[in-house]
Image: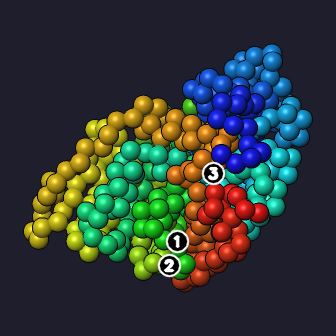
């Protein structure tokens, strides 16, 4: 363990910035840990503050600003606000010496992501980005099959994301606006681009994309839902088919269909497609290597990863099958593992499966892909990270 860290058994005082739908992870982290407590919450919304008072009791300071959370003397804070707010808030916390958990996407622009890494380096405050998919059993299974050499050397990864709840989750509130998310290639794609990079063992250096608002722009029923949460309007039975949706966000200027192609620095090529109006809600990865391919069917314990490594025509079952393991908790068991990893990292600086550099590379790829998508779809270079920052994070945020 590094000097200056709280230590393996230290009690932790936690803060929350943005107590909406995802803000609940702070409460879950504290409960599972047993030696950590949420002591301060900031949210400009009255209903969110009311929820915080109910959840954390009179002992917690509930206010509106990051400064109030800092003043409450927190060791670490969860930033679960709107995507475009992550950078400023995380930087303010790190400057005050607070360890930061910032949810994905780390930021909505490459410049913001780089400023966050630079601030972590400059201040020595710990930075962690909540890419929980790295802890999902299905993703670990895919990763481990590749790492174990079961398909030879990886050459291609194709990810298709069927965002079945897209209309409800991303077109009825702030997610539908470029000003808040840049594009959904950041808000949603950051997850999968990070997974692609992790499994491939490389980062995208050239990217192109095509996409458009192809369906939800035609829905004329609009409603300002400020103050409500997604759980209040998400309804898989009622809100179907997508063109029958009622009460979409007044401003919709993000794409609901997009396709990205990527060339990675280690010779792997990848593609990522995202559609926000499919009837089913899951993502499918196909990974092709020099000696076979693997593909997941489903995401949870009712699903399977199939492997093909013999020449054949159509073989639906694959040559080998690997059931997806069960894990308890949110996002197919990813969240408890993610939150425990973050608290351990805050206390001892222990190595993590998630990576701020990889989170930056997901933002970089998503942001440059967005530029490509909105400027004629040509292939563009993805700028590299400052090698000094890369070395700092590669060494586990030590050695300033
Ligand atoms: N890793 C995951 O699987 C996962 C899942 C869901 C959400 N998220 C991320 O969590 C974040 C929040 O998403 P959500 O679904 O909870 O949205 P939400 O709209 O339910 O909650 C956002 C909250 O932030 C508050 N807020 C607005 N301005 C603020 C400010 N200046 N300071 C503090 N709080 C402010 C809002 O009032 C709201 O309560 C997003 O970045 C999203 O990408 C991650």
237 left or right of 179 in image = left
- In the rendered image, is residue 3 in sight? yes
In which quadrant of the rendered view does residue 21 lie? top right
Does label 1 or label 3 sit earlier along the sequence?
A: 3
Does label 2 or label 1 sit earlier along the sequence?
A: 1
**Which residue is depicted at the point 52% across and 46% down?**
132
Report the front residue among 248 and 327. 327
Q: Residue furthest left?
A: 312
Q: Judge: label 2 CB < 8 Å from ligand 1.
A: no
For disc 3, the neighbor class at 10 Å (few under 14, some 14 to 19, many from 20) is: many
Classify mark 1: helix, strand or loop: loop
Does label 2 or label 3 sit earlier along the sequence?
A: 3
Marks 2 and 1, how far apart in space?
Answer: 6 Å
Dots 2, 3 in contact, CB < 8 A: no
Classify mark 2: helix, strand or loop: loop
To which residue does mark 1 refer? 203
- In the rendered image, is residue 238 in sight? no
**Which residue is depicted at the point 73% across and 43% down?**
5
Residue 46 is labelled as none
For disc 2, the neighbor class at 10 Å (few under 14, some 14 to 19, many from 20) is: some
Badge count: 3
**Which residue is depicted at the point 52% across and 55% down?**
191
To which residue does mark 3 refer? 129
Q: Is residue 266 above or below residue 396?
A: below
Residue 340, percent from left and from top:
57, 37
Residue 192, percent from left and from top:
48, 58
User: Dividing the image into 4 quarters, which one contains the C terminus?
Assistant: bottom right
Dots 2, 1 in contact, CB < 8 A: yes
**Which residue is depicted at the point 86% across and 31% down?**
72
Residue 267, percent from left and from top:
42, 80
Q: Judge: label 3 CB < 8 Å from ligand 1.
A: no
To which residue does mark 2 refer? 265
């Amino acid at each position: 363990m590094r000097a200056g860290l709280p230590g393996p058994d230290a009690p932790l005082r936690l803060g929350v910035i943005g107590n909406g739908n995802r803000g609940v992870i702070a409460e879950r982290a504290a409960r599972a840990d047993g030696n950590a407590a949420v002591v301060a919450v900031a949210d400009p919304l009255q209903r969110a503050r009311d929820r915080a008072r109910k959840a954390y009791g009179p002992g917690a300071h509930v206010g509106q600003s990051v400064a109030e959370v800092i003043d409450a003397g927190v060791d670490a804070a969860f930033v679960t606000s709107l995507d475009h707010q992550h950078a400023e808030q995380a930087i303010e916390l790190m400057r005050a010496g607070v360890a930061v958990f910032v949810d994905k996407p780390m930021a909505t622009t490459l410049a913001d992501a780089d400023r966050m890494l630079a601030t972590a380096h400059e201040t020595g405050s710990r930075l962690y980005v909540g890419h929980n998919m790295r802890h999902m059993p299905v993703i670990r299974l895919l990763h481990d099959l590749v790492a174990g050499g079961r398909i030879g050397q990886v050459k291609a990864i194709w990810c298709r994301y069927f965002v079945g709840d897209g209309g409800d989750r991303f077109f009825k509130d702030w997610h539908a606006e470029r000003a808040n998310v840049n594009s959904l290639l950041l808000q949603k794609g950051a997850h999968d681009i990070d997974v692609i990079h992790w499994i491939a063992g490389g980062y995208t250096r050239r990217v192109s994309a095509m996409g458009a608002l192809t369906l939800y722009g035609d829905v004329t029923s609009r409603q300002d839902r400020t103050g409500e949460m997604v759980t209040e309007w998400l309804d898989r039975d009622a809100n179907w088919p997508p063109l029958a949706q009622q009460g979409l966000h007044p401003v919709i200027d993000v794409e609901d269909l997009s396709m990205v192609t990527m060339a990675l620095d280690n010779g792997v090529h990848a593609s990522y497609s995202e559609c926000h109006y499919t009837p089913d809600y899951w993502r499918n990865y196909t990974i092709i290597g020099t000696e076979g391919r693997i593909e997941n069917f489903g995401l949870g314990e009712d699903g399977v990863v199939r492997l093909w490594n013999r020449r054949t025509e159509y073989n639906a079952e694959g040559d080998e099958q690997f059931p997806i393991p069960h894990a308890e908790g949110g996002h197919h068991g990813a969240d408890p593992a993610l939150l425990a990893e973050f608290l351990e990292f805050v206390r001892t600086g222990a190595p993590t499966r998630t990576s701020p550099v990889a989170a930056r590379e997901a933002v970089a790829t998503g942001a440059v892909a967005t530029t490509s998508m909105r400027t004629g779809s040509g292939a563009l270079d993805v700028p590299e990270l400052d090698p000094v920052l890369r070395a700092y994070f590669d060494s586990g945020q030590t050695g300033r």
